Amino acid sequence: MGPFSTLTKGLRVFGRRRFRSGTVLIGLLALCLAGTTVSAAAPPDPDRGRAAEWTSWQKDLVGSRHNAAERKITERTVADLKLKWAFAFPKVPFLTAHSQPAIVDGTMYFGGPDGLFHALDAKTGATKWTFTLKTVDPNLRRAVVRNSPVVAGGKVYFGDLRGYMYALKAGTGALEWATRLDTHPEALITSSPIHFAGKLFVGVSSDESSAAADYPCCTFRGQFASIDAATGKVLWRHYTVPEPKAVGTWPSGATRFEPSGAAVWASPSVDPVTGTVFIGTGQNYTGTAGDSDTVLALDAFTGKVRWKRQMTHPDTWRLICVDPSAPPGHCPGMENGTALDFDIGSLPNVFTVKGRTLVGIGQKSGVYHVLDARTGEFVWQRQLSKPRPNDLGQSGILWGGSYDGERLYVATNDAKPGALHALDPATGALLWKTENPANGCSWGGSAQYPDECILANRPAVSTTPGVVYEGSADGKMRAYSARDGRVLWEFDTVRDFPGVNGITGRGSGVSAVGGAVVVDGMMYVHSGYHPTYNNDKGFVLLAFGL
């Protein structure tokens, strides 16, 4: 499937259909070892020890989504979390809020569905500055931030739904540069960038997966790019499919192109010792050629493919496949069972077991795969939920897990119900499993909408020592025990919240992309995704503290 805009278009097309849905030394070492096949015994985490920082969506280069230095919020104290403030977004039709914030030196950075990028005081929510995306290319539509920023070297970097990447001065919000990565009219950036050795790494996705029957489909090529962080210059690109060619017409008469798709809407991770960047790709829109549904390991300095592992083939799918009234011919896979939508949107987790560097990644088929980071060979695989083909991939693993040095934590979405799993990183053995609480739709704001409420764990998982954080489509934000999976704390977000910015917002399903950010005794999360529970206001960013 891919980007959030596919889901919003789906809502418009199919009405009320339920979508169940230092660092310098590390860089020098990577330069020395780039191109070798030697893997580190333990990839270092340059953010380790920084309790008051969460610099990127991934939290760190290796994609742990784990703040090992958090000591205030613990298994014992997490039940005392209270709402400290809320930031409310204006109402924007069809757009939700899920630009997970980055926090550095007491400042929080994130974008919104209103076309603004914000810097706030992380403790109080007071605005420090805002940047208007429309100051860049004002005539181009969809000036909206949907991914999450990375902060490095006094700059904050992020992308938008027009395919632009931006660099702003972290202290003032002044524009340093803006680079459009893809001029395709449907190109957009959903991947959250990562910063390594003076470079940014980010994927490019597209809204062409929701193309109508009479649209000349499809011409988008997924790509993954390396960008000079100082100048915005593209250093290399890796395209995931060959250039699409006209091969005939659709039943409507529109030109048919293939192959296409394999968008990169996931976020990358890096093994900083070998200088390898890892990423997952999406499904084909047309045709079957290319690196769809694939884990790619690329040389961070050249873009050369070190290895690749395709998880599902073929997987040719567009949103039109879920419409029973669609003209024939648009979903040829329907006849042979390949219209799956089992692409990879999850963050790769890089970790070590007995000195062996591994890469773990979830798929919308419900499988969590673990591969050797040097060779791409399978180490183990674990089926965590039953896949439902042609259902927007909503039964599987969406955005990514967390690794706390002892366990992997992986959430499944609408697996009837969704669940949170703790896995042994060496073997994949299930250590515990906690289903989305069965009463999630019978209390709080979502209880008023029983036909909409879903027990689904959508966001990426986050952890701190002893605590796992995961939100749900039932509108609840929860904290679990890392030891045994017990629910330690939960909060209903389907309610009105007066915002520190002077407007009132309302929560809904907890954001399906960015998960919780936990720093310095505070926990931050967006509430603003489907189901919306008849929300007549804008969505909210919530800040909790002890």
Image (tube, grey):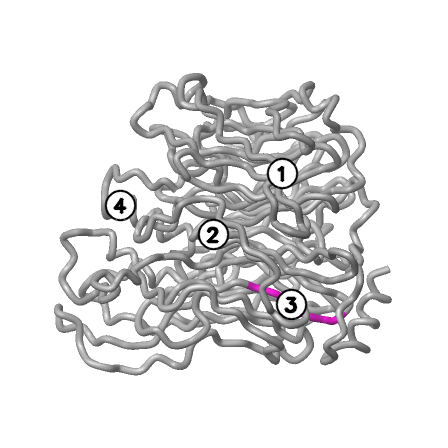
Foreground disc of the pair 4, 2: 4
Q: Secondary structure at mark 3?
A: strand
Label 4 and label 1: CA atoms lie apart by 41 Å
**Which residue does the numbered mark 4 point to in the structure image?**
12
**Which residue does the numbered mark 3 point to in the structure image?**
277
Q: Secondary structure at mark 4?
A: helix
> Height in image: 348 above or below 484?
below
Q: Position of residue 76 (x, y in %)?
A: 74, 22
Seen at 30% across and 62% down, the residue is 338
Q: Is residue 411 left or right of residue 153?
A: left
> Height in image: 274 above or below 115?
below
Q: Main secondary structure of the magenta part?
A: strand
**Sequence-earlier tag: 4 or 1:** 4
**Which residue does the numbered mark 2 point to in the structure image?**
144
Amino acid found under the numbered disc labelled 2: Val
Q: Crowding near pointer 1: few (<14 within 10 Å), some, many (20+)?
A: some
**Sequence-earlier tag: 3 or 2:** 2
Segment tinted magenta in the rendering: 274-279
Amino acid found under the numbered disc labelled 1: Leu
Amino acid found under the numbered disc labelled 3: Val
Label 2 and label 1: CA atoms lie apart by 40 Å
Label 4 and label 2: CA atoms lie apart by 19 Å
**Which residue does the numbered mark 1 point to in the structure image?**
431
Foreground disc of the pair 4, 1: 1
Q: Quadrant of the C terminus?
A: top right
Amino acid found under the numbered disc labelled 4: Arg
Q: Position of residue 144 (x, y in %)?
A: 47, 52
Q: Which one is in front, 32 or 90? A: 32
Label 3 and label 4: CA atoms lie apart by 36 Å
